[in-house]
Image (tube, rainbow, N blue to C red):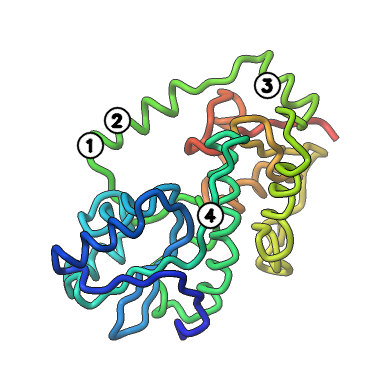
Amino acid sequence: MTNNLPKVFSFTDLHLKKGRKAAKLALKGLSGIYAIIHIPSGRVYIGSSINLARRLAEHLGYVNTNGRLKNSLAKHGPKDFVFCVVELYSVDPEVSKETNQANLLALEQKHLVWLFSLPDNFRFNFALIAGAPIVGRTHTPETRAQMSDSRTGKTLTPETRAQMSDSHTGKSHSDETRAKMSEAHKGENNPMFGRTGKNHPMFGITPTHAMTINVYSQDNVLVHSFPSQVAVAKWLGIKQYTVSRFIKSGKVWNNLYVFLKSSS
């Protein structure tokens, strides 16, 4: 089934020092979407990273990795796996780190849609939505502390939230940059592409009042709008009270998004 998965580069012999070194050198400075495939079973993990070389090292070191993949690596060893670059991403220096991350997640999303069209036993991933919290992902105590500090320290002032609510134009970008951002969210790249019927975040949900929840990147780029907190929570795979809490606090969720509500 992995024959349908595009492969820019592939790296094997990850159990050998020379194999890991070759992969690290080839991936240096590259960003994009990657896949880790268990060769005997064809089971796949898909992810994205601004720093592919570091991300491979994290997976092989069992740091900040998927629980299913971690257990399989520990059981079978790296020799049974291949690391593939599925699609390269060119970091845009004209936009913020947060916008580049959002665009990268949009690219990852289309590959996750393909992956989740396969039976469960062919995938390691837990979450269909790119960037959503992943069950089974483990962090070191130091990483958890850093994550906590980074989230609690990023609180938007009422003035900033008001400016974002009044307008979603944010920073002024060049025509070329706006075209790239638009293209990154078209068709299959859009997180909502193909999500109809039961797959749509609003399936079975009746809004109790007219309230729009806007989801922004940290530099004031509108990512998506939803008619309720429940719909935002379902889209990201989190609890509704988490959305409510971040709306009230003005803090940045998961170092990615800001949630703002406005009356319709």
Which mark's residue is nearer the viewer, 3 or 4? Answer: 4
Check residue 145 in the rendering and tell me which mark sits there, or answer none. 2
**Spatial distance from mark 1 to mark 4, Cα to Cα?**
31 Å
Could one spot residue 246 in this view of the protein? yes
For label 4, the SS is strand
Residue 129 or residue 219, whichever sits in front? 219
Kindly indicate whether the residue at mark 1 contacts the one at mark 3 (C-beta within 8 angstroms): no
Q: Is residue 111 left or right of residue 53?
A: right
For label 1, the SS is helix
- The three-letter amino acid code for the residue at tag 1 is Pro
Measuring 70% from the left and 64% from the top, which residue is drawn there? 193
- Name the residue tied to disc 1: 141
Measuring 37% from the left and 78% from the top, which residue is drawn there? 43
- Name the residue tied to disc 3: 161
Q: Is residue 74 left or right of residue 204?
A: left
Does residue 191 lie above or below 217 as drawn?
Answer: below
Could one spot residue 242 in this view of the protein? no
- Alpha-carbon neighbours of circle 2 within 10 Å: few (<14), some, or many (≥20)? few
Measuring 24% from the left and 70% from the top, which residue is drawn there? 72
Q: Earlier in the sequence, mark 3 or mark 4?
A: 4
**Spatial distance from mark 2 to mark 3, Cα to Cα?**
26 Å
Q: Is residue 45 left or right of residue 96?
A: left
Residue 111 is situated, as x and y percent measured from the top left of the image, at 54, 68
